[in-house]
Image (cartoon, rainbow, N blue to C red):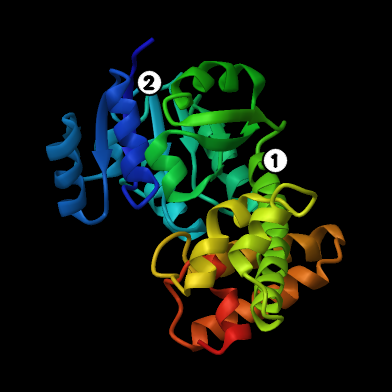
Amino acid sequence: MTASVAFLGLGVMGFPMAGHLAAKGHDVTVYNRTVSKAESWVGEHGGKSAPTPAEAASGADFVFSCVGNDDDLRAVILGPDGALAGMGEGAVLVDHTTTSAIVAREVAAAAAESGIGFLDAPVSGGQAGAENGVLTVMVGGDDAVFARAEPVMGAYGRTIVHMGAAGNGQLTKMVNQICIAGIVQGLSEGLNFAVRAGLDAERAVEVISGGAAQSWQMENRAATMLAGKYDYGFAVDWMRKDLGIALEEGDRNGSRLPLTALVDQFYKHVQARGGNRYDTSSLMILLTGD
């Protein structure tokens, strides 16, 4: 199946995700706030670009968005030149931004008023997952809308799971970020301990990664953490944004998130040291003094 598709937001995730849609034969129109990025995408993948989200979305069967935060999403979807102003009845809007569940439900309600299907579908897997087309997609929204959109999301998603009503995709992403925060801090402490104990830390990782301590973070970040390399990957600024969303939701639903709150403050210290764009594995620098 091929479709007429719009993609709004061409950051480190959106750029390759839109590229996979084009590679699958979909007719893709892109929009990006920085016009040169959209022009670069068209030069690399074909398709076309539009000057506003509404124009990009006009006539599209599916509109995908992947922007920065709640306010960015409201602007590209609900604004006077937003996607809903251009979409036709029966089209489907899929948002891949990591946002609050509140704004996901807000957009879902606005889409429903216009006869448009909506899915909140945050992703996990980072830039590498987007570039390789193997993202995990956590989806909230109507069953029938999910059934329509799932084959199209398969262009860049390896694991695509429907989690229930609108907002549930975002809540699931919060669980993901809560777990990652604790894992990265534990890995940082373990690696630092190995070095200070005089062990061959890389060999220690090789041994324990075959047992219960194994994690994606260990497999993909331990070597770079030991090398002190953090100038890539998922930025600390974005992780703090995500953890802030989770902590606010925890206050609303009565969850106790003491470790998440602590690690969020550790990331604040990384920012204070100029590490705003460092990868999340940079928690290690607070232990090593680098």
Could one spot residue 105 in this view of the protein? Answer: yes
Horizontal relation, residue 78 to residue 32: left or right: right
Q: Which badge, 1 or 2, is on the more N-terminal residue? A: 2
Q: How many marks?
A: 2
Q: Secondary structure at mark 2?
A: loop
Residue 201 place in picture, x, y as percent: 62, 69
Asked if residue 206 is positioned above or below residue 282 in the image, the reply reads above
Snapshot quadrant of residue 289: bottom right
Other residues around mark 2 within 10 Å, as few (<14) / some (14–19) / many (≥20):
many
Amino acid type of the residue tagged 1 in the rendering: Asn
What residue do we see at 46% from left, 52% from top? 74
Other residues around mark 1 within 10 Å, as few (<14) / some (14–19) / many (≥20):
many
What residue do we see at 58% from left, 81% from top? 268
Mark 2 lies on residue: 61
Horizontal relation, residue 186 to residue 139: left or right: right
Mark 1 lies on residue: 168
Mark sitting on residue 6: none
Could one spot residue 86 in this view of the protein? Answer: no
Residue 256 place in picture, x, y as percent: 86, 66
Q: Which residue occupies the foreground of this view, 178 or 32?
A: 178
Q: Are marks 1 and 2 in contact (CB under 8 Å)?
A: no
Asked if residue 119 is positioned above or below residue 246 in the image, the reply reads above
What residue do we see at 40% from left, 53% from top? 75
Snapshot quadrant of residue 34: bottom left
Asked if residue 222 is positioned above or below residue 175 in the image, the reply reads below
Horizontal relation, residue 105 to residue 230: left or right: right
Quadrant housing the N terminus = top left
State how far apart marks 1 and 2 are (Cα): 23 Å
